[in-house]
Amino acid sequence: MRMKMLKSAWGIVLICAFLAGFLYMNNDIGISRGGLEQDVRSSQKIPDDWNIDGDVSSTMAAFISYPQDKSDHTFSVYVNRPGISFGYFFRGGGDITAVEDFIAEFTVEGYQEQAFISMNTQNVERLEIDDGNTVRIIHIDSNKPFAIVLPLNLGTLCFYDESGNLVEYLRQCL
């Protein structure tokens, strides 16, 4: 009886190992939510003294990395694939002028969320989301770059600077 249970246990372990190997070979095992910052640092080769700020939802993650003097940046966008998918997968990143000078908007086809990433040279202090019925406010540190993940079709998004002025680069989600 004991030998039969031991064989059954080994059989289950082998099946699990085979399944895990299959998922790994098909690139179906991603980065855990808690491991995203470390993956950003290693995959984008981010120095240890750079800051990383970001936002993570159940289906998308966005990060911005930058040195203390904000003289450079790198952004990273990850998605958590639908279906049998364990973790987040790198979707894109690097450095582009849109992130440096404006508020860049990133969407991924098939996902119901979008990321807004900026070095915050406009000193954005708040984001107002107007769905036609209510206005929701998200406060942003005007002295720091930001990455925010939001659902699509929220309504009108307005970014305001620390003086209360509408930032020149209004993003709308209609």
Image (cartoon, rainbow, N blue to C red):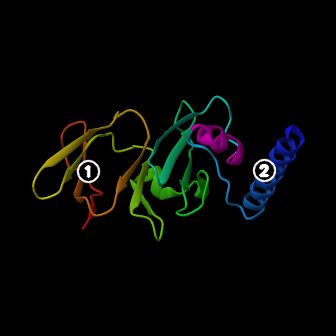
Mark 2 or mark 1, which is nearer to you? 2
Residue at 90% across, 41% down: 3
Residue at 76% across, 52% down: 16
Are the residues tagged 2 and 1 within 8 Å (C-beta)? Answer: no
Residue nearer the viewer, 58 or 6: 6
Q: Position of residue 63 (x, y in %)?
A: 52, 45
Name of the residue lying farthest toward the left: 133
Tell me which label, 2 or 1, sits earlier in the chain: 2
Rendered image: mark on residue 43: none
Rendered image: mark on residue 167: 1
Q: Quadrant of the N terminus?
A: top right
Considering only vertical position in the picture, is 103 above or below 143? below
In this rendering, position of residue 53 left or right of residue 90: left
> Magenta stretch containing residue 55, yes or no?
no
Residue at 30% across, 57% down: 169
Residue nearer the viewer, 119 or 4: 4
In magenta, the rendered stretch is 34-44
- Label 2 amino acid? Ile
Main secondary structure along the magenta-highlighted residues: helix
Residue at 46% across, 58% down: 98
Residue nearer the viewer, 4 or 32: 4
Q: Determine which residue is flagged by label 2.
A: 12
Q: Position of residue 42 (x, y in %)?
A: 71, 42
Q: SS of the residue at dot 1?
A: loop
Please tell me how crowded label 2 is: few (under 14), some (14-19), or many (20+) other residues with Cα within 10 Å. Answer: few
In this rendering, position of residue 95 left or right of residue 172: right
- Label 1 amino acid? Val
Q: Position of residue 58 (x, y in %)?
A: 46, 50
Q: Quadrant of the C terminus?
A: bottom left
Rounded to the nearest angstrom, the CA distance separating label 2 from label 1 is 58 Å
Name of the residue lying farthest toward the bottom: 109
